[in-house]
Image (tube, rainbow, N blue to C red):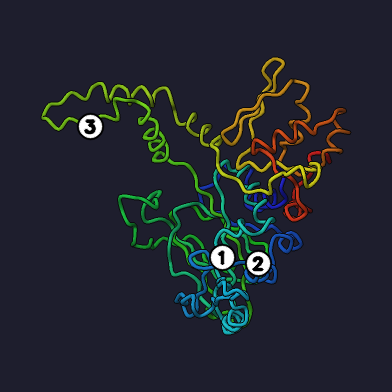
Amino acid sequence: MRHELVSAIEKALGWTGPDEIGKSFARGNIGDLELLERILTPEHLLDVVMRRSLNRPQFRLFQNGEELHPAKYITDTVSPRGQAIPMVDMNRLGGFLREGATLILDQLNTFDPTMEVACQALQWWARERVQVNVYLTTNEASGFPLHWDDHDVVIVQLAGEKEWEVRGTSRPAPMYRDADPNTAPSEEGVWSGVMKPGDVMHIPRGFWHQATRNGSGSGFSLHATFGITKRTGASYVAWGGDWVRTKEIFRHDLDRNPGADTSELLEELGEFFQENPPAKYLAAYEQQPFPTRNVPFVDIFGPLKAVVCNTHFRPRIEVEGSVVSVTAAGRNLLFAGRALPAVRLLLDGGPVGLDAVKEAVGFDVTEIAETLVKEGLCAPLTKELSLGYTGLVTSPLS
C-alpha cells in the first residue's frame, strides 16, 4: 500500500522507514496543505461527532483545564417510541468551542474511512498496531497537563496552531503496566515551540509533553496523534506465557515443599525460548487473526465488482513450486501458481475493480476475489470505503 500521508511523514522527519520509531524525538513539516485538508478538517470532525452516538471516554470535552461532565454536552435523542439514544448536543458543543475548549475524540479510525485507511497504511508500514486520536482546541483553551504516553506517537498538525513543550524521560522505556508509576516529570528540555499546519512531530514513548493555546488569543488548533504500540520484551515473554498452557507440566500445581525439583519445568521453558526467538514471535504477531470490520459480501445484492485488502498487516505471499501460499489474519490460503499476478494485485492494499484486474492478468479473477473476501483478507469496496483511498492511496493497477 502506497499512502500519501505515510510518504509525507517519512519525508518530513527524514526517515527512510519505520526503524526510527521510538529512538529519538524528531520534527519536520509536510508542506502540502491540500493533503492536510484531505485528511481532516474541523468541519468534518464536527460532522462525524454530530452523526454518532458518542460518550466518554472515547469522546471528551475539556475547559479551563478540567474535563466537563458529559451531562453538559450529551443529551438523549428520544424516538417516537421512547427509545433514548445519547447524542452530542451540537448547540451546547458550539457554545463551549466559542468560549474556548478542547474536544478529544479517540480512535477516529473507527468512524471515518479516511482515518481508517491511514491507520491501516501506517500499520502495514510500521508492522505494529496504530490508532488515531484527534484534538480540536479553540481560542485560549489548554490541553492535558504534563504527561507521558505508554506508546510512541506521530503528531500531525492539520490546521491552526498550538504551543508545545517536550521533555525527556524520567524512566527508560516506561510501560502502561510497569513496576514503577513514573510520576515525576523530567527536567530535561527537548523542544518547545509552536506547531503550525503541516508540522509533524515524533515523540517516543515515555517523553513528557504538554500542549496548550493559553495566551494564543482567538483561533484554533486541530491535530491528529497517531499512536504506535510496539512489541517489547515483556510482550515476547507474555507470548511464551500463552504457549505454556499447551504443555501439561505447566498446568500442574507448583510444589511448595523446600527443595522441590523444578529442573524439568525450567528446562522446558528454556527450550521454548531457544526454539522461538523474538523474530519468530514478531512474525507470528503480524499473522494473528485480528478482527476487521467490513461490509459483508451478500451475493443476492449483486455481484462482487471491486475489493480492497483490509488486513491489519501486509499479507505474506510466497511461491512454493506450483503453489501460491498466502498467509494473513490467521489464515493460510493456497492458490494455483497461475493465480500469482491476480493475488498480488488484489492484496496490494489499494482498491481494485475485478474487471480491471481481469484485463491486467488475462483471466477471470472473480473466484479468487470471492475467496479472499470470504476468508477475511479482502473487503467489498463500497462507495463510502472508497472515499478513504481517493487521492491518498495509489492503485496497484496504475
The residue that appears at 56% across and 65% down in the rendered structure is: 105
**Residue 196 in view here:** no
Q: Badge 3: few (under 14), some or many (20 or more) residues near its Cα, within 10 Å?
A: few
Quarter of the figure that contains the N terminus: top right
Looking at the image, which residue sits at the far top?
321
**Sequence-earlier tag: 1 or 3:** 1
**Sequence-earlier tag: 2 or 1:** 2
Front disc: 2 or 1? 2
User: Hey, what amino acid is under mark 1?
Assistant: Leu
| Viewer-closest of 282 and 342 | 342
Residue 238 position within the rendered picture, expressed as x and y whole percent measured from the top left: 38, 38
Above or below, 346 against 56 in this view is above
Does the residue at mark 2 contact the one at mark 1 (Cβ under 8 Å)?
Answer: yes
Q: Indicate the secondary structure of the residue bearing disc 2.
A: helix
User: Hey, what amino acid is under mark 3?
Assistant: Asp
Disc ID at residue 253: 3
The residue that appears at 54% across and 74% down in the rendered structure is: 102
Residue 374 position within the rendered picture, expressed as x and y whole percent measured from the top left: 67, 37
Q: Is residue 70 left or right of residue 310?
A: left
User: Hey, what amino acid is under mark 2?
Assistant: Val
Above or below, 299 against 40 in this view is above
Residue labelled with disc 1: 105
**Residue 181 in view here:** yes
**Sequence-earlier tag: 2 or 3:** 2
Residue 70 position within the rendered picture, expressed as x and y whole percent measured from the top left: 49, 75
Residue labelled with disc 2: 48
